[in-house]
Amino acid sequence: MTRRLYLIRHGQADYASTARLATSRGVAFDPPLSATGREQAEALAARLRHLPPPVAVYSSTLARARETARAYASPAGIEVIEVEDLCEWYGGGWEFKDFSQIFDEHPDARHLFRNQQPAWHLAPQAETGADFAARVRAAIEAILAEHRDGDLYLFVHGGVINAFLAPILGIAGQEMFFLPANTSINTVLIDGDERRVWFLSDDAHLTNPEWFERD
């Protein structure tokens, strides 16, 4: 039977934070949710309570994803399974820099970003796009194989969502082809080995929260 894989982006992060997390790829920037992000996560949780419960809830090990997942899972008494390979692309020398710093150091990056061209390869000591896409897809497919029935919630990151959806949509050579909204729900229908995109960047719980206030 067809089931659903929900790829859910984290809430807004507190980018003023200097928090970091040691990962197998290097030390990553690891900001928690901002005050707005926590509000977004609560609105998302209210929405998810209107859906059939998933068979499992997964999250990356980065704080912004973990906190978004727990806003839904903790009140429901659901365990959140954390998987490092669901983390965002590792940016190496760009991990703790904002775009103004990146553009100062790599003037060609500004032109590439403006013109919707790949630029992440310019980051020194960063994870390659091919390696990132491969580890994301392997991690998600392993989760699907672990749970052969039922819906799944994965609380992840914009790059992760792009990496998994790209081959399903027949998109090649572009690292980020769309920008999922914070706490947006991106849904893939799973039917055996077939994967079909069903919904992208659905954040109705933020734009129309009244829809989810009551049954």
Image (cartoon, rainbow, N blue to C red):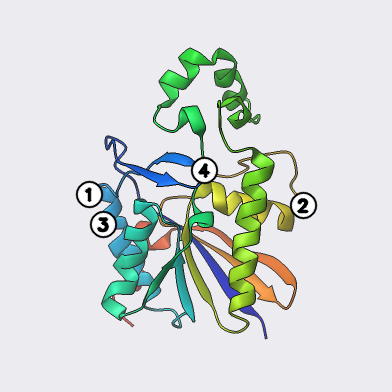
Q: Distance of mark 2 from mark 1, alpha carbons?
A: 37 Å
Q: Quadrant of the C terminus?
A: bottom left
Q: Mark 1 is on which residue type?
A: Ala
Q: Position of residue 119 (x, y in %)?
A: 61, 28
Nearer to me, 149 or 60: 60
Tag count: 4
Q: Distance of mark 3 from mark 4, alpha carbons?
A: 31 Å
Q: Distance of mark 3 from mark 1, alpha carbons?
A: 6 Å
Q: Quadrant of residue 95?
A: top left
Image side of residue 5 versus residue 75, left or right: right
Q: Distance of mark 4 from mark 2, alpha carbons?
A: 28 Å
Q: Which residue is mark 1?
A: 35
Q: Residue at x 33, y 45 (%)?
A: 13
* Marking on residue 170: 2
- How packed is label 3: few (under 14 Cα within 10 Å), some, or many (20 or more)? some
- How packed is label 2: few (under 14 Cα within 10 Å), some, or many (20 or more)? few
* Marking on residue 185: none
Q: Residue at x 60, y 84 (%)?
A: 149
- Which numbered disc, 1 or 4, marks the residue that appears first in the sequence? 4
Image side of residue 175 versus residue 124, left or right: right
- Which numbered disc, 3 or 2, marks the residue that appears first in the sequence? 3
Q: Quadrant of residue 161?
A: bottom right
Numbered disc in front, either 3 or 4: 4
* Marking on residue 39: 3
Q: Residue at x 32, y 37 (%)?
A: 15
Q: Which residue is mark 4?
A: 25
